[in-house]
Amino acid sequence: MPGFCEQERLLERRLLAAREDERRRFARELHDDTLQALGALRVQLSSARRSDDVETLRAALDGAVNELGREIASLRMLISDLRPAALDELGLRAALEALFARADSRHDFTLDSFISVDERRGRLDDDVRTTIYRIVQEALTNVARHAGARRVEVTVVEHDGAITLSVRDDGRGFDPASPREGFGITGMRERVALTGGRLDIVSTPHGTEVTAVIPAVRERVIAPARDLMRF
């Protein structure tokens, strides 16, 4: 039976590994989307620069301006995904609603949500708020990338000192025991475990439901983990 210090170090290593997985995902998004788009834009402008035709140059500049606008918007969304300002400034509900709005604008599925959480000032532990947000965020990312769902339902409800969140979709499902790379399930489990909660995933060919039950106030047993969780 490992001692307390060994357990603490193990949890820290596992959470650090989960954070690295998240960082790899964001780096992949920057490489596959933003950098490739900027590279294509550079080629387009370089080609136009060799032309003496005014209309060709004007069309290239107009296209560049439009493309830069799209990439700026994409980077703003990515920055918000990394650490939403609303989570610190306005609270969990506002951050989740902003997340839902971005999901609606990016993806084809219909999203319905219900949030009922007591957010009186200082009541919810920061780690709890961050964990709830990240679990919902990762679950929606999985739905968008892998499920092919038409409808998604998200509920976040507080009852008897615990917060239960559920993300349910009607997509194609997967095997939670052997998820493909990019699902982020290890990170989800580690985050929830460090709050003293539990995470369950049920998936069939007709849909998937991710459910987490998290204490509204986290017991601070492992002191260093607090800073690790605020990614």
Image (cartoon, grey):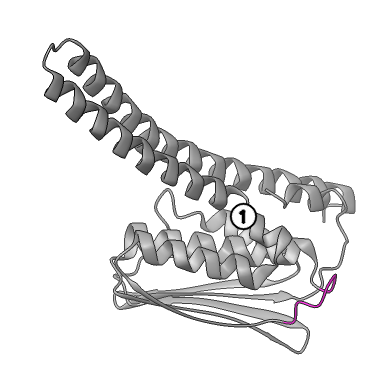
Q: Is residue 78 left or right of residue 86?
A: left
In this rendering, does residue 62 appear at all? yes
Q: Give the x, y percent position of residue 178.
A: 43, 58
- Which amino acid type is marked by label 1? Pro
Name the residue nearer the viewer: 30 or 191: 30
Q: Quadrant of the N terminus?
A: bottom right
Q: Is residue 105 left or right of residue 62?
A: right
Name the residue nearer the viewer: 212 or 112: 112
Residue 121's quadrant in the figure?
A: bottom right
Residue 94's quadrant in the figure?
A: bottom right
Residue 118's quadrant in the figure?
A: bottom right
Is residue 104 rendered magenta in the image? no
Residue furthest bottom as drawn: 160
Q: Say what secondary structure mark 1 lies in.
A: loop
Q: Which residue is mark 1?
A: 84
Is residue 119 rendered magenta in the image? yes
Q: Give the x, y percent position of residue 104.
A: 39, 67
Q: Residue at x 75, y 61 (%)?
A: 127
Q: Give the x, y percent position of residue 52.
A: 13, 11
Q: Which residues are drawn in magenta? A: 118-123
Q: Is residue 148 left or right of residue 164?
A: left
